[in-house]
Amino acid sequence: MSLPESLRKNMQQINELFDSSVIKKRDFDALDKIYTSDARILPPGAPLIQGRANIREFWQSAIPALGVMGLKLTSEDAHLDGDSIVEIGQGDLALNGGQTLAVKYVVHWKQEDGKWKWHTDIWNTNQ
């Protein structure tokens, strides 16, 4: 099912919040607005991580360790199916030293407390 424009804008705001607050400001409490409480992430080359507290711990370590300075996410496709949205997209990861790394991702969105959030998040590089 095609997404209403208001829902697409809401998804874009959440995707931009990850960049503006989590990455650029290192405000890891903003993850509460992005991920569901029982969310899962599947980082490349690492085991599945479940639960917002564990996800916060992962990002608090990974973002500075990888030298991540920014992330521009571009949704390529998103489908509403019942109480879920599946989004496929691409991203440009800005790293220390001016390097950019191209990534692709799939996010399974679910509603929590009336707000759409990332429930399952998997990504990898194009290299």
Image (spheres, grey):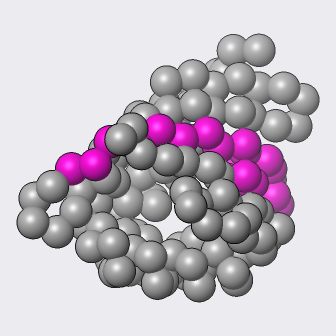
Visible residue check, residue 29? yes
Q: Quadrant of the C terminus?
A: top left
How many marks the image carries: the answer is: 0
Visible residue check, residue 32? no
The picture places residue 77, in percent across and down from the top left corner, at 57, 22
Task: In the rendered view, tell whether residue 28 sits above or below residue 88.
Answer: below
* Image-quadrant location for residue 34: bottom right
Q: Residue at x 34, y 80 (%)?
A: 64
Q: Is residue 37 magenta?
A: no
Taking the view exactly as shown, the residue that stands out farthest to the top is 1
Task: In the rendered view, tell whether residue 83 sits above or below residue 116.
Answer: above
Taking the view exactly as shown, the residue that stands out farthest to the left is 97
Left or right position of 59 against 112: left
Left or right position of 71 against 96: right
The picture places residue 18, in percent across and down from the top left corner, at 46, 61
Q: Quadrant of the N terminus?
A: top right
Secondary structure that dominates the magenta span? strand
Q: Residue at x 46, y 84 (%)?
A: 61
The picture places residue 125, in percent across and down from the top left corner, at 42, 45
Q: Residue at x 72, y 43 (%)?
A: 108
Chain part drawn in magenta:
100-120
Left or right position of 2 against 112: left
Viewer-proximal residue, 50 or 81?
A: 50
The picture places residue 100, in percent across and down from the top left corner, at 21, 50
Viewer-proximal residue, 113 or 79?
A: 79
Q: Residue at x 59, y 85 (%)?
A: 57
Q: Is residue 103 magenta?
A: yes
Task: In the rendered view, tell whether residue 18 sits above or below residue 51.
Answer: above
Left or right position of 40 against 45: right
